[in-house]
Amino acid sequence: MHTGKTFETRDPRTGEVIAKIAEGDKADIDLAVKAAREAFDNGPWPRMPGCARARIMHRFADLVDQHVEELAALDTVDAGKLFLMGKMMDIPGGANLLRYYAGAADKIHGETLKMARPLHGYTLKEPVGVVGHIVPWNYPTTMFFFKVSPALAAGCTMVVKPAEQTPLSALFYAHLAKEAGIPDGVLNVVPGFGPTAGAAMASHMDVDKISFTGSTEVGRLVMQAAAMSNLKPVSLELGGKSPVIVFDDADVDMAVNLVNMATYMNKGEICVAGTRIYVQEGIYDAFVKKSVELAKKSVVGDPFNPNVHQGPQVDKDQYEKVLKYIDVGKSEGATLLTGGKPCSDKGYYIEPTIFTNVTDDMAIAQEEIFGPVMALMKFKTVEEVIQKANSTRYGLAAGVVTKNIDTMNTVSRSVRSGVVWVNCYFAFDPDAPFGGCKMSGFGKDMGTDALEKYLHTKTVVTPLYNTPWL
Amino acid sequence: ALLESHERHRVTTKICCLPVAHQNVHRFSPGRTFPTVDPRTGEVIARVAEGDAEDIDRAVAAARRAFDEGPWPRMTAYERCRVLLRFADLMERHNDEIAALESWDGGKPLEQSAGGEVPMAARCMRYYAGWADKIHGMVVPADGPHHVQVLREPIGVAGQIIPWNFPLLMFAWKVGPALACGNAVVLKTAEQTPLSALYVASLLHEAGLPDGVLNVVPGFGPTAGAALCSHMGVDKLAFTGSTGTGKIILELAARSNLKPVTLELGGKSPFIVMDDADVDQAVELAHRALFFNQGQCCCAGSRTFVHESVYDEFVEKSKARAQRRVVGDPFKKGVEQGPQIDGQQFKKILGYVKSGVDSGATLVTGGERVGSRGFYIQPTVFADVEDEMKIAQEEIFGPIQSILKFREVGEVVRRANATQYGLAAGVFTRSLDTANAVARALRVGTVWVNCYDVFDAAIPFGGYKMSGVGREKGAYSLGNYLQTKAVVAPLRDPAWL
């Protein structure tokens, strides 16, 4: 790195420093972009056929699988994520996503067109060029592969800035990428901070595209920087305040478990967390009672322990922010049913928390807390709950629990969100496009849709003479 | 002299029994076998179990069970993808062995089997593996308050009949998409080349393909083939072979259960050399377009139309090129052309030589047998060929190039299209406008501009007119192995339509 400056990354179980990481700033971003530019303009990666990129991506996926324990451990010490989940889901999920896009690399096609005059026209889908990826700290591995996989398949080169809280696994992935045969300069990882490295990338005149996952506030800054520099296209996957709507024909136990998972998964540090829980009045009392029981049974502790359900919040800042929202909730007049306190005086552990008597205008109902805090609310009718669910500036995910086909169809079309999970939650899939609307952002990750972010459509037209058909 | 000694090679025929449903299947027809012959010598390589209607019945029953009850269609597409990728890995690992088997059974130069066909077959499997988890239907806008989803479902049991000219590649083109879509398959190999499919089927099993999903039945057309086409338990038929047989196939499908049929049939593909062509390049390309694989390609460029301004030079250079073509034991290095597949084809081709001579075409070079053993024929060139001659009308499937003269574009397009076939065409020109106009005007499934025989996995291939129905390869092949189901439900108070 350029200046020799370093920064610390800490273990949220204890607050202690794990390692000092080289800190990239504007000059380092410049170097990385130069390398990516050279690799794109003159290197082999975009010039290989998709099937050749696919072979290398498959090797990369195999290497990820081979190092699953190390990688899961890195994310656990860096972010407090459950080790078992990392081993079983996050890391293999990353490898699987690489494989999904490897299989797409040789299937990116343009179209021949139906012109209204004697012209031969067709579209070419070209790699967009040098991509800047800004990856958050809550799912360091998953988010890394969400972004890197389709960009690689499309033939782009890239600079990845992992979150300053969680730089470790990204650095390891860069090493594995090289081992897999990804040519130099194609995948560059620059650890650093948002206001320096991130801002430099968003304002860089030679970056062709930015893909950002993070908070709505920072997403705004990224978009501004892109506009002020070279108008690079931006895709943003931002925050959410996702509603889960439980109708009274739901199986109460199933719904209680679903909602518990929706709110507390990954200690609530997940953009699609279901944090506004609307329960129809017919089952409301039973639902509240069972939810409190389940929350109290949750085991909060060392994420390396396979019996633990919830690890620590990622760092001191987040930890303090969550506790502050809990205080705000209390002062706004919501009723605290359970939790609300830290679990220990070491590290950043917070009890699974439930508020009721929450009104939609309260801060804890409007603002993204990003912690293990559930807001439980009662509703009467479908029309009412749709209106409540939509009364947010966010629009990322929504959950619906009902057995009724008409309710499901009506609600899924009426709720303004990027994904609707019916009788399930967090049902992510490599083939299912994911992304938000409204202030949760725009642009999709996953699915074949994600490739569009890294491609540019060029239309080619030439006149036709003596054509027997048009 | 070229053919007196031919190489010994280290391949043995391991699997000659019927691996129907794979596990411990024993011969059920009372031991009838048929020989498969080495076209270098006419000698028998091995005797292979001969499947008949009863064996087809059992194979279809196994496939039916595998589809209706077994794990294959029920596993995630991702898991199917992994099986197919493992299969591709195994094919690559055994590349040389498979190639040697193919060259031994079919007479094609080992360099082409090992360096071309086997890697291409593996590539094709990888391509389709990558489609497995990306098969989408549409959610379509209704004209009123209805929620409409279109599901693409595996079609069921696919019957596939493959030819002898590219046994392994044709295996991959058919089995790849069928399996990627979640179907079960009964595959009948050509009686001339039953070996490579039996071998790679065992590799598919090793890769994790469940029992009964792929059933390979060696046998003959009139018995096994006809039984497969007529079977009431087969949901789909795919055939590559001659146009004559294709007609029978379609008829049998119609008479039985109306199973949908795709056909890849014969051709008499024009190779058009315009006046602005680089003659040396055109000669070389036209030569390969015809002589590749001993002329045994459905899409062989078998009518070489040359503009009058470059005609004489073209004929001279084509003659020289043909005379330079190295004919010999396919296991020897540097050999470009091996023997024809069998005695029947051999006789048929020599018959066309006589026809060409009798009808007044100019025999520029070749026309004779090579050596005294096996089915080798000299690279043969006819010039001054006229459209009405048999050698210009009928598919020869051998190393006979026919060169015809033309004056202008409109004329050559008309003459190129004046055939019942419509498989492929080559156009050799530097002009962008000519390429665009002629490509659109030719009624063929593939137009190769300044190239030929480019068969990348994503490129759809198939014929117009009597060259066939439907397309293989690319995304276009998936539809052959999927059914389409619309699911419709009413919407109450939709927020938008």
Image (tube, grey):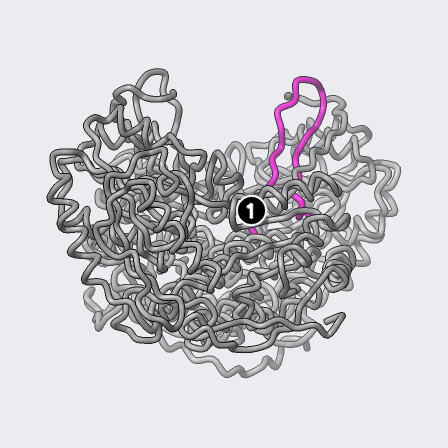
Point out the image quarter for the N terminus of chain A: bottom right
Which residue lies most toward the top here? Answer: B144
Which residue lies most toward the front here? Answer: A331
Observer able to see residue B303 = no
Provide the secondary structure element on which disc 1 rests: helix
Q: Is residue B130 left or right of residue B225?
A: right
Q: Is residue B430 left or right of residue B215?
A: right
Against A462, residue A229 (above or below) is below
The quadrant in which residue A88 appears is bottom left
Numbered disc 1: what chain?
Answer: A
The quadrant in which residue B395 appears is top right
Foreground residue, B148 or B313?
B148
Residue type of the residue flagged with mark 1: Leu
Count of labels in the image: 1
In magenta stretch: residue A111: yes
In magenta stretch: residue B323: no
Observer able to see residue B366 = yes
Q: Position of residue B88 (x, y in %)?
A: 47, 66
Q: Residue at x 25, y 21 (%)?
A: B492
10 Å crowding of disc 1: few (<14), some (14-19), many (20+): many
Foreground residue, B486 or A97?
A97
Q: Position of residue B158 (x, y in %)?
A: 32, 48
Against A406, residue B398 (above or below) is below
Q: Residue at x 42, y 52 (%)?
A: A430
Q: Residue at x 11, y 34 (%)?
A: A282
Q: Is residue B101 left or right of residue B447?
A: left
Point out the image quarter for the C terminus of chain A: top right
Circle 1 residue = A451
Q: Is residue A265 left or right of residue A169?
A: left
Q: Which residues are magenta?
A: A106-128
Q: Position of residue B125 (x, y in %)?
A: 47, 59
